[in-house]
Image: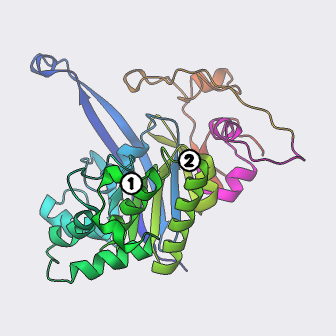
Amino acid sequence: MSEDLLRVSDLRVSFRVGGLSARLAGRATEIEAVSGVSFTLQRGSTFALVGESGSGKTTLARTLNGLQPVRAGTILFEGQELQGLSNAALKPVRRRMPMMFQDPVGSLSPRLSVRSLLSEPFVIHGLSDRDLSAEVTRLLALVGLPRDFADRYPHQLSGGQARRVGVARAIALDPVLVVADEPTAGLDVSVQGEVLNLLNDLRDRMGLSMLIITHNLHVVRQIADRMAVMYLGRFVEQGETEAIFRAPHHPYTAALLSANPEPDPDRVHQRITLPADVPSLLARPSGCEFHTRCPQAQRRCAVDVPAPVAVGNSRLTCHFPLNT
């Protein structure tokens, strides 16, 4: 049986909105950006978070890495509770669970060479006694870049090359879990495939686990064992990736998948178009929060909050699941 590496239970993350004057006057408002999220990630597996912009995916990932405080819930990583830890106590955790940020080039300091960028994790974590030149060469080889790239700067790299450097930084200290925020963002389709193949290869070679944050469903199907679909900070469907792709049960999941069709001459594809406006977190809809955009919505959906239910291998919140 696989071991749970990361276990998240009823996680809640809030932000206070409003300027200083609003806070002094007591008019500041709190919004819940992540609301009651629970999932587990097993060693050697990949879990994907999917949803539109503003769904809470990146906030959730930053919270796991200690970059955003937790309001409620628990995060267990390798059996250790992370919430409430100081920055000093989180430092060894971040060594084991590094985060790759979205912009391939922008996430790299323009003032540092690739050599310095790849040496930096060792220096930050007090490992500068290692042969850093040998470590840089090793890391470049792992991500498929020539050793002379060590002397280049970020502006001299293509998007794909910059992403490979970002991957190399993330795996520098032999982590157990890599959190990757939109790992293929801004890359050509062919380069996206190369990056995903690299991540899959490193996962197999190094025994890595991965948490992928993306809106690109093709990425999810190529790399993730399990996935969760987020809407307004909540999971609306969660389960095995292939099962969800074959038969999505939540109308929101079905709409997202319809916008990223797989080429199949034997299937008639029908695009599900949703109203463009995602509700504000300041004014969450009543009942099922997706009902204002859902093509399947009925009167009950606007009134009753759906309880989580299991349908096949998936778990979802919907009064009228699809494909049942």
User: On the rendered structure, is 257 left or right of 157?
Assistant: right
Q: Give whichever of 188, 22 is nearer the camera.
A: 188
Q: Residue at x 54, y 32 (%)?
A: 305
Furthest residue toward right? 266
Q: Position of residue 144 (x, y in %)?
A: 47, 71
The residue that disc 2 covers is 188
Question: Dot 2, crowdedness within 10 Å: few (<14), some or many (≥20)?
Answer: few
> Above or below — where is 142 with respect to 218?
below
Q: Secondary structure at mark 1?
A: loop
Q: Give residue 157's mark.
A: 1
Residue 244 included in the magenta stretch of the image: yes
The answer to whether residue 312 is visible is no
Residue type at mark 1 is Leu
Q: Secondary structure at mark 2?
A: loop
Q: Position of residue 138 (x, y in %)?
A: 36, 79
Q: Position of residue 270 (x, y in %)?
A: 79, 33
Mark 2 or mark 1: name the one nearer the start of the chain: 1
User: On the rendered structure, is 305 left or right of 270?
Assistant: left
Quarter residue 123 falls in = bottom left
Q: Residue at x 56, y 54 (%)?
A: 192
Q: Residue at x 37, y 62 (%)?
A: 165
Residue 15 included in the magenta stretch of the image: no
Residue type at mark 2 is Asp
Quadrant in which the N terminus appears: bottom right
Quarter residue 168 falls in = bottom left
Q: Give whichever of 177, 315 is nearer the camera.
A: 177
Q: Give whichever of 27, 178 is nearer the camera.
A: 178
Q: Which residues are magenta?
A: 238-267
Q: Residue at x 57, y 36 (%)?
A: 306
Q: Give residue 25's mark.
A: none
Question: Dot 1, crowdedness within 10 Å: few (<14), some or many (≥20)?
Answer: some
The answer to whether residue 306 is visible is yes
